[in-house]
Image (cartoon, rainbow, N blue to C red):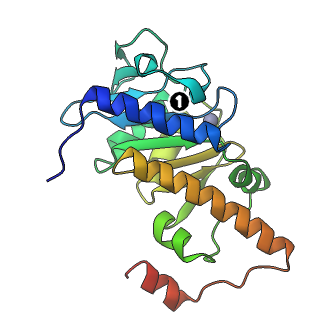
Amino acid sequence: MAVEKSVDELKMEIVEFTRRLYMRGLIVGTGGNVSVRIPDSPYILVTPSGLCKGYLKPSDIVKIDMNGRVIEGRLKPTSETHMHTEIYKARRDVNAIVHAHPPFCMGFSCAGVPLDKPILPEAVIVLGEIMMVDYETPGTMSLAKKVAEAAKKCDVLVLKNHGSVALGENLEQAYIRTEVLEEYAKVLLISNLLGGPKVLSEDEVRRLRGI
Ligand SMILES: [Zn+2]
């Protein structure tokens, strides 16, 4: 049985994975946000608003309840707090969420082109179906509700004209999904430029997904 992580360990994990997101260019400036559910509690830990996520300290992480109220922390929680809390309410199995702004993925999201071509086995296995969510103003409850509704059906979402949302049983899984999503978007764009990808057969996709 997996040993549950302490709040301090979870804060350290958020610091580590947001640094990786920033170093890999999956977020820039003050964009993106990350959260984890604190085991056996009604609380979550979220990144603060307005700071560059590449240089966070554990003490910058904010503890909030499922209504977005701050329980502990000196900084303001992310402006996308509602998006995180609504997803956790909709998906009891999700313990971590990464919202990033990966440039190749955002290119597809801005062009309204779906990321739905099965071309890479790893992407098929790790990402599953990728849903595109219609544009809503960032930080609003209407965006949060739309994302949470779509999240009932998949673990990876692309927000039109905005960015990505990846869910996980833990933060590492949500992070890996974000990395693989961006790699997949990049390879799909390159193969489009080279005359179009040769997609995997439906049988192969079923085999990869273990259906
Ligand atoms: Zn965003």
**Kind of element beneath mark 1:** loop
Image coordinates of residue 110 in percent, x first then y, are: 76, 50
Q: Position of residue 205 (x, y in %)?
A: 51, 82
Residue 20 vertical placement versus 77 (above, below): below
Q: Choose top left, top right, bottom left or bottom right for residue 162.
A: top right
Residue type, mark 1 in image: Glu
Q: Which residue is mark 1?
A: 80
Few, some or many residues within 10 Å of mark 1 (<14, 14–19, 20+) = many
Direction top: furthest residue: 74
Q: Residue furthest left?
A: 1
Task: Say whether residue 139 is visible.
Answer: no
The residue located at (72%, 61%) in the rendering is: 186
Vertical position of residue 204 compared to residue 56: above or below: below
**Which residue is rendered at x = 59% and y = 30% of the image?**
54
Left or right: 107 in relation to 164: right
Depth order, front residue of 185/13:
13
Residue 120: give x, y in percent of width and height. 60, 75
